[in-house]
Structures are given as structure tokens and as C-alpha cells.
């Protein structure tokens, strides 16, 4: 008889072959059996999951922790960020290692390793950011050999020293094709955006419109043109492309058409683009919501939910880049000076579950695809991560189908002292989170050990 260290008993378990009431037996860090009525021995820890959904731990594949950005450093580090993730059922995150000054790609990875070591409670890896094509292009293969299979380029952020031009995008996609790796792209059209910002950057308009200028200077075509252009580079090179934080209906239309033509392009959206629209910028503290790209219009929200259903949107992530109120106050009325980004790790699963599954926009299984299975497959981590399957890591989130918690930043693990969802009633916070067999959240409280999280080497990426 198999001896289990842990049995998760009687939950509604979402597996790749269907959802059913069953038990999960765990030995060490792995799932060892999935069957009803597994036998416990005296040393087996039994976790009662009856009346709950049991889903694979969530992968948030778009996270920035302790990021130097916009003249400050994002407020969630690997300690608070991974605690927040654990509470939200996230068991794997992928951050972005960005080279600074004269850094090589390898230096960037080393820097991000140091940020995570001793602090991370959940498993992690990094997308490697290519910010200076001429210097970095010959370092890409070395990073693949080091276990990094996803790279990132930004089409904006010239002032940060991060911006890539078409030459870099084209050349990187050629290399992605050659190495079987994937390029993630932040797609916004830099030159036209600069022009629109310059036209609006007057004391009169800033006094009149405040944070609303963030949305006024980023019409949907800013994202759509950039997506269209980089999709073209993917089409002609055959390099695997992944559009991060897609926020527009136009973007979804372009991705759908490109995928139909056989272009190797995938798209992610983020929870905020599915539930918030740009009316938030007219609120008293509207500047808090500023991120790039910004949340858009109700019609974009509907189109992105449709894209999740029909398939052109494969992943929901967060783009967590937390700034607290004091940091956000640096704007002093000038929207171009707002530290751009929002907290999100802790609320990804609750927001998606409450506004997706409970509102019948997507099924429980579709939610698991977008939060766990697809990100694991696309980022080269499946079936170790993203599945409740024999042999997979025992990464699980156990959620009550209807029990609600009111979002209150004072009760949260994130270092943010505000939340885009403050006062919202959300179901889907993790009652119990397991990471490689360890209980890291128990009865909605984080109990895991900081520093137990492991770096995840990879050999593949893209839609295999
Ligand atoms: O506003 C954002 N999104 N901040 C993080 C950097 C990025 O563009 O992802
Ligand atoms: Zn971005
Ligand atoms: Zn980002």
C-alpha cells in the first residue's frame, strides 16, 4: 500500500481529464495518486477539502518585484510579494530580470537571483530583458544554456534605457526561431505616444484633467499599431511571440487574425483589464490606477473576456508592480511622473474567479487553463507546474466556491497601502495553498517559510 505524506480529501478536483470529487495523495513534493478514498496511515496529514474546489496552484507569469522604475523602487519585494501570491493561491511567479547600466544578461539574472534568495516562499524564474540589442544579442544563447527560455523587449520606456527598436525586435525573433525560445513584448507605439504626451503636457490641461490625461494620451491605436507591427516581425521570422498585458479589443482582433494565418503569436491579458475601465482616472485618487498600458473602455473589457473564451487570449496574469500612496504621490499633478503599476498577485485568483466563473463568463476549467495550465505550458514549466496529475509538483489552491472576503489593504500581505479592488467582495481567496507538498497557507493565513521557494530552470517555451 502506498504511504502518503498528505492526502487532500474529498475536494472538487480540476484535472486535465475532468473535474470530479476525489482525493489527492502526496508523497514528498509530488502528486502520487488521484483517486477516491485513498487510505491514510498514522503519519499521513489529511486536509479536508470537502465542499471546496481544488485547482492547480496559479502561475503569475508577469510580475515585477523590487523593480527600480519611474524614479523609485516597486514596493513589493520577494518577501511580501510571494506571501501575497501564496494568499492568492499563486505557487509560481515569473519576474523580469532587467540589465542596468553596463550589465550583461547574465548580470541581470544574477541580480534577480539575489533579490529572491532567502525571501521567496513560492517558486520563481525570470524572463530575461534585452535592453541594448548590440550588446546583448550575442549573450542570448548563453542564457538559454543557463535555463532561461523566455526573453522580453519593451517598445516604450526610452527614458528608462529599456526601449527596443524594430531592428532589435526583428533580430531577437530570428534568434527565438533558431533556439526554440520565446520573445515577450510590451507593445505600445513609442513615437506617436511621445507626440500625444507632448501635445497634452501643458499646465492648463494638467490642471483640468489630472490623471485622466494618462488615458487621453493613450488611445487604443497606440497598443494596436505596436501589436500589428511586431506580429509582422513574428510572421516573417517565424519567431515565437507573446504579447504581454494586452488591454484592447483591437489587440485581440489582431491576435485572432494572426493566429488564423498561422503566425506563432500568443497573448496575455491582466486581471485589471478584465474588471476596471478608464473612468477610474476621474476619481479623487485616480492617479493610483496608472499603469502602462492603462485600463481601457467597457467594450475592451467585453472583448477580452470573449478572447479568453474563444482562445486568442491564452493567459491571465497581473503585471504586479506595486507602488504605495507615498510613491504614487510623486506625480504632484503631472501624470507623466506617476510611478506606473499596481499591486495584483494577491487578488488575481479571487478577481478572476468572482468576475469570471461566478458571473458565468468562463467555466472553472477555463479559469484553470488561463491561470495555471496555459501559463505553465507556454512558459516551459508543464507538467511540473500547472496540472493536478500524478508526477506533477503538489502545488494546489483550495478555494471555497462562494465564501466572500471584502478586500481591505490593511489585512493584506502586499506592501501596498491601497488596492484597486478596495471594498470589493471577492470569493476565491485560497483557504489552503500547497507548494511542493508544503502547506504555505492554512485557513487563509500565510504559514509557509520565507526562502523555501526555488528557482525553476527551463528548456522550452512557446506553444509546444
Ligand atoms: O505600468 C506598468 N505596467 N509597470 C510595470 C512595467 C511594465 O510595463 O510592465
Ligand atoms: Zn509592460
Ligand atoms: Zn510588466
Image (spheres, helix red, strand yellow):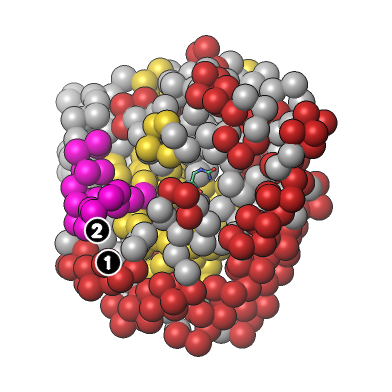
- Res 350 visible: no
- The N terminus - image quarter: top left
* In the image, residue 40 lies in the stretch drawn in magenta: no
| Number of numbered tags placed on the structure image | 2
User: Vertical placement of 457 versus 180: above or below?
Assistant: above
Instruction: Indicate yes or no whether the magenta region holds residue 114.
Output: yes
- The image quadrant where one finds the C terminus is bottom left
Range drawn in magenta: 96-116
Crowdedness near tag 2: few (<14), some (14–19) or many (≥20) residues, C-alpha within 10 Å: many
Taking the image as shown, residue 124 lies to the left or right of residue 371, namely: left
Q: Residue 170 placed where, x, y %?
A: 44, 78
Nearer to me, 409 or 424: 409
Q: Residue at x 34, y 30 (%)?
A: 77
Horizontal and vertical percent for residue 322? 48, 31
Q: Residue 105's mark?
A: 2
Residue at image x 63%, y 73%?
A: 228
Q: Are marks 2 and 1 in contact (CB under 8 Å)?
A: yes
Q: Which residue is mark 1?
A: 136
Secondary structure found at label 2: helix
Amino acid at each position: 500500500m502506498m504511504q502518503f505524506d498528505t492526502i487532500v480529501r474529498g475536494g472538487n478536483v480540476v484535472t486535465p481529464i475532468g473535474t470530479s470529487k476525489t482525493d489527492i495523495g502526496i508523497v514528498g513534493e509530488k502528486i502520487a495518486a488521484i483517486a477516491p478514498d485513498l487510505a491514510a496511515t498514522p503519519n499521513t496529514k489529511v486536509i479536508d477539502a470537502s465542499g471546496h474546489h481544488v485547482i492547480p496552484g496559479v502561475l503569475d507569469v508577469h510580475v515585477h518585484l523590487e523593480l527600480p522604475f519611474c524614479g523609485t523602487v516597486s514596493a513589493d519585494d520577494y518577501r511580501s510579494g510571494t506571501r501575497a501570491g501564496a494568499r492568492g493561491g499563486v505557487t509560481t511567479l515569473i519576474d523580469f530580470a532587467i540589465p542596468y547600466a553596463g550589465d550583461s544578461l547574465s548580470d541581470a539574472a544574477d541580480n534577480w537571483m539575489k533579490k529572491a534568495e532567502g525571501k521567496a516562499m513560492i517558486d520563481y524564474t525570470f524572463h530575461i530583458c534585452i535592453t541594448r540589442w548590440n550588446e546583448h544579442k550575442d549573450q542570448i544563447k548563453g542564457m538559454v544554456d543557463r535555463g532561461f527560455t523566455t526573453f522580453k523587449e519593451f517598445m516604450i520606456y526610452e527614458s528608462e534605457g529599456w526601449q527596443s527598436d524594430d531592428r532589435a525586435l526583428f533580430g531577437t525573433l530570428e534568434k527565438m526561431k533558431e533556439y526554440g525560445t520565446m520573445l515577450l513584448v510590451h507593445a505600445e507605439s513609442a513615437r506617436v505616444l511621445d507626440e500625444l504626451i507632448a501635445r497634452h503636457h501643458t499646465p492648463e490641461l494638467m490642471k483640468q484633467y489630472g490623471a485622466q490625461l494618462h488615458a487621453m494620451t493613450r488611445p487604443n491605436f497606440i497598443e494596436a499599431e505596436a501589436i500589428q507591427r511586431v506580429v509582422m516581425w513574428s510572421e516573417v521570422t517565424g519567431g515565437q511571440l507573446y504579447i504581454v498585458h494586452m488591454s484592447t479589443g483591437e489587440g485581440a482582433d489582431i491576435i485572432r487574425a494572426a493566429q488564423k494565418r498561422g503566425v506563432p503569436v500568443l497573448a496575455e491579458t491582466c486581471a485589471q483589464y478584465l474588471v476596471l475601465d478608464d473612468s477610474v482616472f476621474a476619481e479623487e485618487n485616480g492617479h493610483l490606477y496608472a499603469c502602462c498600458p492603462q485600463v481601457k473602455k467597457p467594450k475592451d473589457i467585453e472583448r477580452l473576456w470573449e478572447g479568453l473564451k474563444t482562445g486568442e487570449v491564452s493567459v491571465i496574469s497581473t503585471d504586479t508592480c506595486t507602488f504605495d500612496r507615498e510613491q504614487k504621490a510623486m506625480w504632484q499633478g503631472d501624470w507623466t511622473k506617476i510611478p506606473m503599476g499596481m499591486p495584483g498577485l494577491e487578488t488575481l485568483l479571487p478577481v478572476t474567479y468572482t468576475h469570471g466563473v461566478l458571473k458565468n463568463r468562463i467555466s472553472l476549467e477555463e479559469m484553470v487553463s488561463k491561470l495555471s495550465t496555459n501559463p505553465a505550458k507556454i512558459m516551459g514549466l508543464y507538467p511540473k507546474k500547472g496540472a493536478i496529475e500524478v508526477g506533477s509538483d503538489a502545488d494546489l489552491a483550495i478555494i471555497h466556491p462562494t465564501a466572500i472576503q471584502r478586500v481591505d489593504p490593511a489585512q493584506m500581505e502586499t506592501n501596498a497601502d491601497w488596492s484597486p479592488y478596495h471594498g470589493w467582495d471577492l470569493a476565491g481567496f485560497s483557504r489552503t495553498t500547497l507548494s511542493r507538498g508544503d502547506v504555505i497557507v492554512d485557513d487563509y493565513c500565510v504559514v509557509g517559510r520565507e526562502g523555501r521557494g526555488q528557482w525553476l530552470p527551463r528548456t522550452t517555451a512557446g506553444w509546444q
